[in-house]
Amino acid sequence: MIEKNYQPADIESRMSRLWEESGAFQAGRPERQGAKPFTIVIPPPNVTGSLHMGHALNNTLQDILCRFERMRGRDVLWQPGTDHAGIATQMVVERQLMERQQPGRRDLGRAKFLERVWQWKAESGGVIVNQLKRLGASCDWSRERFTMDEGLSRAVVKVFVELHREGLIYKDKRLVNWDPKLLTAISDLEVQQVEIKGSLWYLRYPIEGKIFNPDDPMTFIVVATTRPETMLGDTAVAVHPDDERYAHLVGRHVILPLVGRKIPIVADDYSDPEKGSGAVKVTPAHDFNDFEIGKRHGLPQISVLNPEAGLALVDNEDFLRGLPEGAAQLAEELHNIDRFVARKKIVARLDEFGFLERIEPNTHMVPHGDRSGAVIEPYLTDQWYVDAKTLARPAIAAVRSGATSFVPKNWEKTYFEWMENIQPWCISRQLWWGHQIPAWYGPDGKVFVAETEEEAVGNALGYYVEQEVITPEQGHDMALDPARREGFITRDEDVLDTWFSSALWPFSTLGWPDATPELKRYYPTDVLVTGWDIIFFWIARMMMMGLHFMKEAPFSTVYIHRLVRDEKGAKMSKSKGNVIDPLGVIDDYGADALRFALARGAAHSHDIKLSPQLVETNRNFATKLWNACRFAEMNGCALPADFDASKAKQTLNRWIAHETSRATREVTEAIEAYRFNDAANAIYRFVWNVYCDWYLELAKPVLLGEDGAAKAETRAMVAWARDEILKLLHPFMPFITEELWAVTATNSGVASSSPSPIAGEGGEGGKRQAPAPMVRPAPSKGGAGRPLLVLTEWPTHKGLDDDAAEAEIGWVVDLVTAIRSVRAEMNIPPATLTPLMLAGASAQTRGRAQRWNDVVKRMARLADISFADRAPEDAVQLLVRGEVAALPLKGVIDLSAERARLEKEAAKADADIKRVDAKLGNEKFVANAPEEIVEEEKEKREAAVARKAKIVEAMERLKQAS
C-alpha cells in the first residue's frame, strides 16, 4: 500500500539498504557475464572533501548513465574511490595536531606523522563516500579504491621508474608556483587569482655611458612594474621590436638602480607598447613570462628570494657576482626581510636617489594559494618534471582521429590549445603525505631511480665499484650488511603531485601493472564525465598515461558539464554567502528532487542556475508522481501478467501507449547524446502533462463507467504506463521510483473487479479499495517476485505508434489547451461558462466533438458546443489542427475594459524592454558589471519580449471579438 504522504528521507534510507544488500551495483554479476561492459571511473574526490554542488551535478550525471546502461543490460562498472589529496590532507592533520596541542609535524618526524595521517584517514576519510551514497550514486562500492592503496602505489612507482628510464621524467631547475607558507610547489589548479588594488611603479633605469639626471629623459629609460622588490634580480629591460621610441636603445645597456649591475636592453614581442611605459624589467627567476624571455635571449637567472619569500642576498653568489662594494652593504640591510616589507624599503631608496618617477594606482590579479591564502611566488628551484610535450603528441592525435571525442565538441578546441602549448609538468611536491619519489642520491649526488630501495642500493653499489669509489669487497660487504651501507644513499624527501597518481586512475584501479581479468574486461572505459576546469590537469594527463602504458585511450567519450551557479547566475562562493549545501537540500527536499533539478538544468550551452525553490519545484513533481500512483492503486489499476499494450482497443489507451513510446524514444535518444536536460524535461512533460493532466483525467469517466471491458483495459493501461514511467524516470529519480516499483508490484496481476470511487491527485474524497498488503522486497527482487527496478530492462517499445489515436486525443488536448489559454489571457472567471462554435468542421471533427462532448465541456469550462459554417463576427477564433474553433465573447467579458488592461500591460512591457536596452547599450555597464548581472538583464529583456508577444496576440484576438 502506498503511504498517503511522500516522505523522501524514509524512502531513501530504505532503498539504499536494499541496493546494498542485494549487490545491485556490482559489476560482473553472473547473469551479465556475456554482456557488453560499460565502464565509468569516478573523478576521485579528495579524501578530506565534503559533498558540494559540483560533486552533486557530476555524480548525478554519471549515475544517470550507469543506471541507464545497467537497465539496457550492460555489465556496468562505475569505479569509485578517493584521492589522497596531498596538501589538503596534510593541512587537516597538522591543524588537528595544533588544536589538540600535540607535537607538530616536524617534532613528530616523517614516520610518526604519516602514522597520524593514516589514522585520520581511517577515522574520518570516508565522509564523502557516505555522502555520495546519500545522493544515490550506484558505484560498485565493493571495488572502492584509494590513490595510496598498496596496488595503486605500486603502479605509481612503476610508471615513474619506466618514464625516467625512457628519459621522459627528469630533474631540472625551473620556475614553479611556490607557496611560501606551505613551503611547496603547487599546481596551477591550486592557484586562485585574486583582484588586488595595488600600484604600478615607474622606475628610471640609467642608460650606460650617460650621467644620470632625473630631469633629463635622455639619460634613462622608464620601466613600469607591479613588483619593485624583485628588481634586485633584473637581468634585462625589454622593449617591443616595433616601438620606435626605444629602437635606438636596443643592444645598449642600463645600470640597475641601487645594485649597479649592467643589464642589456633587448627587443621582445612580449613587451606591450600600449601598457605602462612600453618598457619592462625582466626578472627571469621571479616571473613566468620573464623566464621565457630569459630563455629566448640567454639571460642569467638571479633568484633574490628564499623559500619563505624573504630576500636572500647575503652569500647569494648569483646576486653579488660582479657588483660594486655598495651592493654588499645593501644585501646586508635587506637580507631575510619579508618581500612586502622589502618592497617599501626599496621604493623609498629608489625615491631617495631619484630613480622613482611616479606611482599609479593599479588594479590587477595576484595569484594566491587556495589552501594557504598566501601570495604565490614564481620561484626558481630544482624539481622533477615530466616531458609532457612528448607524451602529449599521441594524446592530441587520439582526439584528432576521433578515437576520443568531446561532448560538446567545442571543448576539443580548448584541449588542443592547451596540449599544443604544453609545458614540462612539475610533479614533485615538498610534502610528506603522498607517494614518495622513488629516487635515491649517492654520496656525490648521483641519482638512482628504482622501484625498491634494495634495487637502488644494488645499482648504486655497482656504479660506485665501477667508478672505483669503493672496492668490490666493500661493495660486497655493504650489500650483505644493511648497517654498513646506512646513510650511503638517501631517498628524495619529496612526494609526487596528486595529479600524477590520478592520471593512472582508469587502469591502476583495475589492477595494472598486473594483467588482471578486470583490466582486460573494463579498460578502456566508455565515458568520462567531468568539469571543464580539469581538462588539462586530469583529462589530458589520463590520455597521456593511458596511451603510453596501455597503448589505448582511456575513454572514448569525454562529456564536459557546465557549472552550478546560484539563482542569479553568480558563481557560488563562501565569501558571497551564496553557497547552496547539497546535503541541506537533500534534508529538506530529498535526493531525487535535487538530482532532477540538476539534470533538468544540465544543458550543453549554459551553466545551471539553482535555488532551493527550484529544487522544491522538482520535489512537487515527485509528489505529483506519488499521488498519481496512489490514484492508480485506489482505483484498482494493476498490471495483469499477460498484458500487451499493443493489443489495446480503447482509443484513449492506444493514445497513451503511443505517447509512452514517443517519450521513451525522446528520453533514450537524449541520454545517448548526453543531452541530460532534454531527457529529464521529456520525462517531466510526459509525467506531468501527458499522463497526469490528460490521460488520468480522461480515464476517470471510464473508470467510473459501466463498461466492464473498457474499465479493465484502462486499469491495466494506467498501471502499464505507470510502470513504464518508473523505468524511464529511474536513472534520474532512483529512490522514489524503486519504492513505487516495489509497492505497486504487490498488486500486479490482482486487480479487483469491483469499482472504486475516483479520488483526486491526493486520493481524498473517496472510499479506498483495500489493497493487498505491502511486501518488502527481498534482495534482487522489487516486490511480487519481479527484479529490482535498478536491474529491470529499459523500455524498447515496438508496434505502439498509433497516428489515428494521436489525431483524436491530440485534438481534444489541443482544443482544451487553446480554450484555456484564451480564458487566461482574457481574464475570464473560472465560474463563467462560455459557448464554443466549431466553424466549417469536417465530419471527422464533428465525430470527435460528439464523442468527447462532455469531457471537453468539463475541462474547458464550456456552456455548450455547436457547429456553424463560419465563425460569428464577435468571436475569438482559434486554429486547432487546421480547423477553426470560435469563442463568442460578447457579453461574456467587458471588451473595452479588457482592451484597456492589455494596452496598459503592453506599455509596461515596452517600458521594461526600453529600460533594459538602455543598460545593455551602456558600454561601461556591460564592461564593469559582473557577468551574472549582465546575463540577468538579458534574461529580463527576453522575458519582457515574450510577455509583449503574448499581449499582442491577445489584443489581436480581442479585435476579432469586437
Image: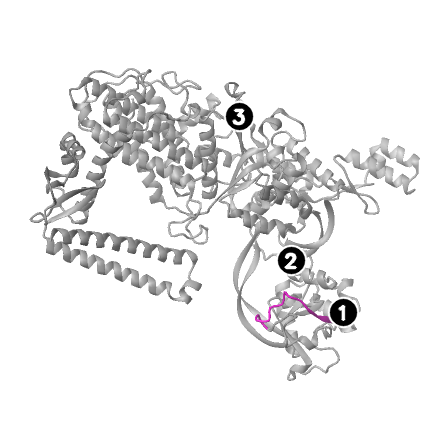
Cβ–Cβ under 8 Å for marks 2 and 1: no
Pick the residue in front: 421 or 780: 421
Quote the CA–CA distance across marks 2 and 1: 25 Å
Could you tell me which residue is drawn at 35 percent across and 17 percent down? 775
Could you tell me which residue is drawn at 88 percent across and 41 percent down? 464
N-terminal of the pair, mark 2 or mark 1, is: 1
Residue 317's x, y, as percent? 78, 63
Q: Amino acid at mark 2?
A: Pro
Q: Quadrant of residue 353?
A: bottom right
Residue receiving disc 2: 378
**SS category of the residue bearing label 2:** strand
**Crowd tier of the residue under label 3, counting other residues whose Cα lies within 10 Å: few below 14, some 14–19, many 20 or above:** few
Residue 741's place in the image compared with 930, above or below, is above
Quote the CA–CA distance across marks 3 and 1: 73 Å
> Residue 36, which numbered label?
3
- Main secondary structure found in the magenta portion: loop
